[in-house]
Amino acid sequence: MRGIRRTSGRLELRGLPCSLGEVVNISAGGVVVDGRPPTAPRVPLELGEGGDRIAVRAEAAWTVRLRRGRARTGYRFIDPPPDLLPRLLGVRLPESRQRML
């Protein structure tokens, strides 16, 4: 079985509001969430809260069952906005640095 290769670093952002559960960590390519097991391979996902919500489409890449009907799921973003992480962090990076995320 082949492993999934990471193409970017991860940030631990526990407490970040997410429509699918509790965020464990996030990267420019996806997010790991503790919540209900996915019911479909592709899902709409909202990160943030209030007027700062960011909507992205994602697909479940892997799932590990936890206790009490919960699961930890890795979601891969489908066409995320290039400024996703800076928007979530509230930091504006120069255009040249945004691609590094």
Image (spheres, rainbow, N blue to C red):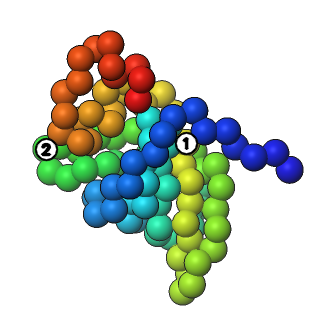
Residue 77 x/y as whole percent: 50, 38
Q: Earlier in the sequence, mark 2 or mark 1?
A: 2
Residue 95 x/y as whole percent: 28, 14
Q: Give the residue displayed 48% in from the left and 40% down from the top.
A: 9
Compared across the picture, whether 13 is left or right of 5 comes to left
Compared across the picture, whether 3 is left or right of 100 comes to right
Residue 37 position by quadrant: bottom right
The residue tagged with tag 1: helix, strand or loop? strand
Compared across the picture, whether 50 is left or right of 16 comes to left
- Residue position for label 2: 51
Marks 2, 1: nearer the viewer = 1
Q: Give the residue displayed 63% in from the left and 74% down from the top.
A: 65
Outermost residue on the top side: it is 96
In the depicted structure, whether residue 99 falls above or below residue 72: above
Q: Number of labelled discs?
A: 2
Outermost residue on the bottom side: it is 68
Quadrant of the image for the C terminus? top left
**What amino acid is at disc 2?**
Gly
Q: Give the residue displayed 19% in from the left and 34% down from the top.
A: 91
Residue 32 x/y as whole percent: 49, 55
- Residue position for label 1: 76
Outermost residue on the left side: it is 51
**What amino acid is at disc 1?**
Arg
Residue 69 x/y as whole percent: 56, 81
Compared across the picture, whether 71 is left or right of 98 comes to right
- For the residues labelled 2 and 1, the Cα–Cα distance comes to 24 Å
